[in-house]
Image (cartoon, rainbow, N blue to C red):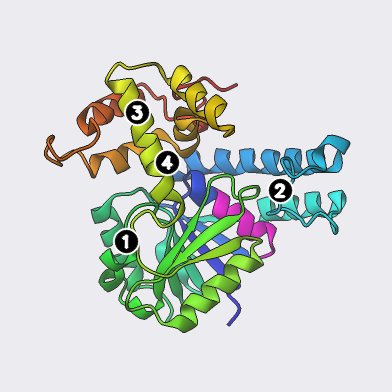
Amino acid sequence: MKLNNVVVAGGGVLGSQIAFQAAYCGFNVTIWLRSEGSIGRTQPKLDKLKEDYIASIKKMASPEGKTKENWCMGIADFDSFNEEECIKKVENAYSNIKLELDMSKACKDADIVIESMAENVEEKKNFYKKLALVLPEKTIIVTNSSTLLPSKFAKDTGRPNKFLSLHFANTIWKNNMTEVMSQSKTEKKYFDEVIEFAKEIRMIPLPVLKEKSGYLLNSMLVPLLFSGMDLYVNGISDPESIDKAWTLGTGSPKGPFQILDTVGLKTAYNIVMMYVKIPSFLAPYNFKGMAKMLKQYINEGKLGKSSGEGFYKYK
């Protein structure tokens, strides 16, 4: 079955990107949001994504853009790239994404629901229980959770056989990979359909054959972020120096604090809070110090790139 009608639950950094990418690829896309305030926070993200896609396309059309470093495979293949057609697809995506507060209306004909909400177990459980009451029988549900296992929520969905993980990397039109992970109750048929859907929105799907917190990417990324923050909160060095140690020493384009600003400090805080209660003699990092530090930034409105300031300032 082709998954034509896509509902993204949550309009955060990744939720808005997933919605825009699916719409860019011609899918019918609705973003379900919990409040009018959520609409006010999501619409500017979609406005910015339109700008970012067009800027990427124009760069790809320039002589310096025709390099592996600048090319965005989520937008077009190198050999078939057409600037005018790509910009038209961006305009169509921007115009056709729907924002909806009524869950029943949003999901009435959904083929797939992509949950992209904050890493809060109880909020996710409550969402899935409400979703189960309004979903058509045909609908597949996937979670974009970056750290939580799908088996933790399978029962709450009311359809564990059609529930699995589909995890995206940030800036998905450029970093166009996604991790597809099933849980013990997932039927292979639906796993295969999600793999195919990922390809249709120009992602490279990576199968995760065994349930693992953090999947492939975050199993490697989260320890890096923890290590960077641990160095900072223990007074070893400052964010800029820690980032430079990583970028200059490895050739990576971003250091841990630059990555944290991109991911968003609220997401980082929610992940850290899952580790705060670990006894100090077992904890490899100063999680309490990290939580206190991140909370201070959040209280000051420094949420990362999305708010214009995090560990760094953005124009």
What is the CA distance from the residue labelled 2 to the residue labelled 1?
30 Å
Location of mark 1 (residue): 149
Q: Write down the residue under mark 3.
A: 229
Q: Which residue is mark 4?
A: 37
- Give how far apart the Cα atoms at labels 2 and 3 are: 30 Å
Q: Residue at x 32, y 56 (%)?
A: 148
**Which numbered disc, 4 or 1, marks the residue closer to the eye?**
1
Where residue 17 sits in the image (x, y, percent)? 57, 49
Closer mark to the observer between disc 3 and disc 4: 3
- Mark 3 packing: few (<14 Cα in 10 Å), some, or many (20+)? many
The picture places residue 22, in percent across and down from the top left corner, at 62, 60
Tag 3 or tag 1, which sits nearer the N-term?
Answer: 1
Q: Kindly identify the residue that appears in the image at 34 percent across and 28 percent down.
A: 229
| Magenta residue span | 17-26
Residue 299 falls within the magenta-colored stretch:
no
What type is the residue that disc 1 sits on? Leu
Q: Find residue 269 and report its horizontal and vertical position in percent.
A: 31, 36
Give the residue number, with chain letter if any, for mark 2.
Answer: 72
Earlier along the polypeptide chain: callout 3 or callout 4? Answer: 4
Q: CA distance from mark 2 to mark 4?
A: 32 Å
Q: Marks 1 and 3: which is nearer the front? A: 3
- Looking at the image, the residue that sits furthest to the front is 249
Q: Is residue 296 visible?
A: no
Q: Amino acid at mark 2?
A: Cys
Q: Main secondary structure of the magenta part?
A: helix
Disc 3/disc 4 C-alpha distance (Å)? 31 Å
- Residue visible at 70% across and 44% down? 53
Residue 115 visible to the viewer:
yes
